[in-house]
Amino acid sequence: MKIFAKKIMEHTSYNFSAEKQSRGGRISSSRLRETIDQSQDFEGLEENVKPFDLLKLVKRAGKAAGFTSRMIQLLDYYMMFSRESDWQEGSQPIVYQSIYKTAMDLNVSDRQIQKLEKQLFEVGALTWNDSGNCKRYGQRCAKTGRIIYAYGVDLTPLAYLKGKLEDIIDEQELYKAAWMETKRQVSWHRGQIKSILAEMDDLDIRGQGAFETVYEEIAVPYRASMSLETLRTMLAEHKKLYQQVLEVFATDNNKANLEKSSPKADSLGVHIQNTIQEKFNKLNTSRDTSHCLQEERNGSTEDKEVTTGGTERPEKAKGRIQASQSKPAGHLKTQESGSRGDLILKTGLQHITVKQILNAASQRFKDHIPLEHRAMNMEDVVEAAYALRPALHISQKSWANACQILTKYGAAVCLLLVDQAAQRTENPVRNPAAYFNTMIARARAGELYLHKSIFGLLKRETEAQAANDTSEKSPLERS
């Protein structure tokens, strides 16, 4: 009896869980109902927005928006079945091709298509407009091409993703810009460090080997997979090493380089070139009355024309290149106080007149002086110096540093001397930027004497002119 009852129970039992899994229709959810409501309320794409513009946004956002390459491939495939009329108000972009045909075209299984559709649904790129048995079919109007009825994959939710995708892309662009800028700065510091280490090796400066060891440890190759945080850490390490190398080079070798590479009157030395490109407000040229050269007239009713190195300017410009005669000393009235004022006074800048500066300048420097209907002043010298700066490969950062220490007038005189040193026939300076930086380093140490350098140039110019005049005279005239 018990056996008979057990058999009856086995034949009459019903597996409700199996029915739940095999029954037709799609399991509803709040997310599915929300996407269906979006499709019903769809009012068409914005003006000038095309369906494939949405696909471009998906491809650009990629993994950041949750899209894998397989998901994008299926979405791209479905987009080919939609028309612009499907994305207008009163219509829906429904793809009603069967899953089996889609799987055959993409060379994957139908189960894989279902899986990819579910993933696209989860990121908000599609929903479904199902028939009673989840079969996919539809019909278009033969005249207008608009969908009359359709059941299948509904791409309407993709239109609602537009704003989110654009925000993700903007964040990606900012990240990429920061990544590339950080990489550029690391590359610049690497170049500077290698340049200084090579020069230290040539000059047998102690510590060069230890610095090279540290550099090899931090100079790892770049990879696109590196995070921005990794690059920023790398940049901090390079900056630290660069400052250490620069400090050792400037401290231990400045004086030796100056004595070796410069004549007595305008000895200036060699320093590492600084070529960093940073945004800079042009040469700090706003007038600063506390540093202007205050020139005093000698009482004459006419100003003498400044010597221009033998090259005559055009006739229309002759009246604009006059500089007032100045006393040999005392015309620089600085109101600077403290260490900066002392440094400026030690350079002897107050002992130099505008006329002396212009007479000491090379013809290349004079060609950059602006022509105005007035007498020349130090602002014109500053303007010419800044215009010539790129030709000497002197960076904006170096110029700003010089203006900070010596004022823009002192920086202009330094650049003038660098220009002359680069054009010397004997022992010309091969690295003007390093030469300029060394001058500023000497000024910071209180060891730069600009007036002596200017006077030395003028003296050599006078002696050269006298020798030239003597050689042009006949033997009888020389006797």
Image (cartoon, rainbow, N blue to C red):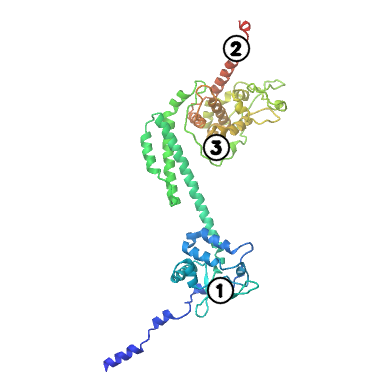
Q: Position of residue 33 (x, y in %)?
A: 52, 75
State the separation of the CA atoms marked 1 and 3.
60 Å
**Disc on the earlier residue, 1 or 3:** 1
Left or right of 136 in this view: 305? right
**Disc on the earlier residue, 2 or 1:** 1
* Quadrant housing residue 375: top right
* Quadrant housing residue 284: top right
Identify whether 324 is placed above or below 272. Answer: above
**Mark 1 and mark 3 residues within 8 Å of each other at the beta carbon:** no
Q: Which residue is at 48% across, 64% downward?
A: 71
Pick the residue in front: 233 or 377. 233
- Secondary structure of residue under mark 2: helix
Q: Amino acid at mark 3?
A: Gln
Q: Which residue is mark 1?
A: 37
Work out which quarter of the rendered image holds the N terminus and state it.
Answer: bottom left
| Residue found at the far bottom of this picture | 1
Q: Which residue is mark 3?
A: 396
Q: Position of residue 114 (x, y in %)?
A: 46, 71
Q: Which residue is at 46% across, 80% downward?
A: 24
Q: Which residue is mark 2?
A: 471
Left or right of 472 in this view: 318? right
